[in-house]
Image: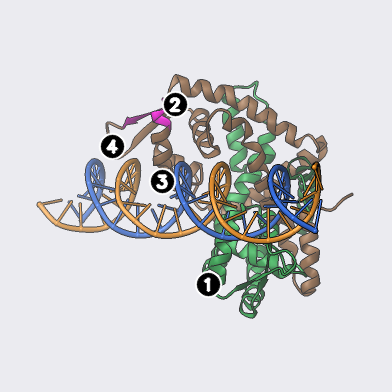
Chain colours: A green, B brown, C blue, D orange
Amino acid sequence: MTDDIVALVVRQWQAVDPELDTGPMEIIGRINRCAALLQQAEDAPLRSAGLTRPEFDLLGAVRRTARELTPGELARETFSSGAAVTKRLRALQERGLVDRRGDERDRRVAHVRLTDEGRALVDRLLPEQLAYERAVLSGLDDGSRDELGSRLAELLVQLEGRIGGARR
Amino acid sequence: MTDDIVALVVRQWQAVDPELDTGPMEIIGRINRCAALLQQAEDAPLRSAGLTRPEFDLLGAVRRTARELTPGELARETFSSGAAVTKRLRALQERGLVDRRGDERDRRVAHVRLTDEGRALVDRLLPEQLAYERAVLSGLDDGSRDELGSRLAELLVQLEGRIGGARR
DNA sequence: GGCAAATCTTTTACAGGTGTAATACCTGTT
DNA sequence: AACAGGTATTACACCTGTAAAAGATTTGCC
């Protein structure tokens, strides 16, 4: 059983100050490292399609939702600012992947939907992306994967309640 | 037992296409969401000290390491580009928190160390930061925390081998 | 009913951070 | 002495968030 980076980092801190309660690092440090490593790896299939991950997240959010979404909903769904969503939408619209339609009742809001081309792109890319992710996770056996998923869900529920505030 | 966001997202995808193997999302999606939520929350104590998280990570890496580090090592340690490290070092040096010293044997490399002020700042901030993180994690009982930490370590070892390539 | 204030949604302006690629410099090798 | 490889920095383009602005709707009050 070999140590991961975080275990090493924790030992370094303990050497600096044995009084330090490094417990949270074992969770939060590892989540951050995993996310950083995954982000580097996981974007490979996307780049070949000329998309960034935030762009793909946006397209995916529209694809998996039954009704059309507004820019504000997309911002909340993808954890980004409204301004970032506006810029991404313009870029995606110029590429013919999404379409904006104004609401006729309330002329402040817009509704975003995928073009046929946009939907086709997502439907082609997502299985590819999932296969890639499955390969990355193949080092864990089924039991570990399930256990990890469950514990992460538990944490995520806590974080959403504590931090995320209002959803939906 | 309430569902987390990812469980909802997975159900949405299943409704779009029941053939889709959404397994990887249960892990990777959750890690990304947790990381995003944590990043929003976790930086509060840092901002009050006028530091960003990447800056704090850099200071922490220097603090916890016995010997001095070079900019290149810091880039690898903090998952950022060399250019970003150069800029951060200049900003931190202007604030009197770090010090650069050239190697006398090999004049390409520089060695970075903390000033007394920099070390004092890290030593004051880190316990604060850890207390904050402990509060964020307080919703999980000890058993879940340990289990989650272990599983994340297992995953991280896999990812380091598979993606990270050369460490140390 | 009608007008103004408050609120909401989206977009624009601007400042700041990051990465890629080019540059400058150094070392060791042939 | 030239060259290949390595290290740090600079130049530049891009993306992001905060804050301000523009446009539209609802609310409150007379």
Disc 2 residue crowd, few under 14, some 14–19, many 20+, Cα 10 Å: many
Disc 3 residue crowd, few under 14, some 14–19, many 20+, Cα 10 Å: some
Task: Please determine if labels 4 and 2 lie on a single subunit.
Answer: yes
**Chain on which label 3 sits:** B
Farthest-out residue, right: B1
Task: Please determine if labels 4 and 3 lie on a single subunit.
Answer: yes
Is residue B69 something that shows in the picture?
Answer: no
Which residue carries the number 1 mark?
A94
Looking at the picture, tell me which residue is in the foreground, A159 or B25.
A159
Which residue carries the number 4 mark?
B106
Residue drawn at 56 percent across, 30 percent down: A12
**Chain on which label 1 sits:** A
In the image, what residue type sits under mark 2?
Leu
* Range of magenta residues: B92-102
Q: Nearer the viewer, mark 1 or mark 2?
A: 1
Q: In this rendering, would A6 be left or right of C18?
A: right
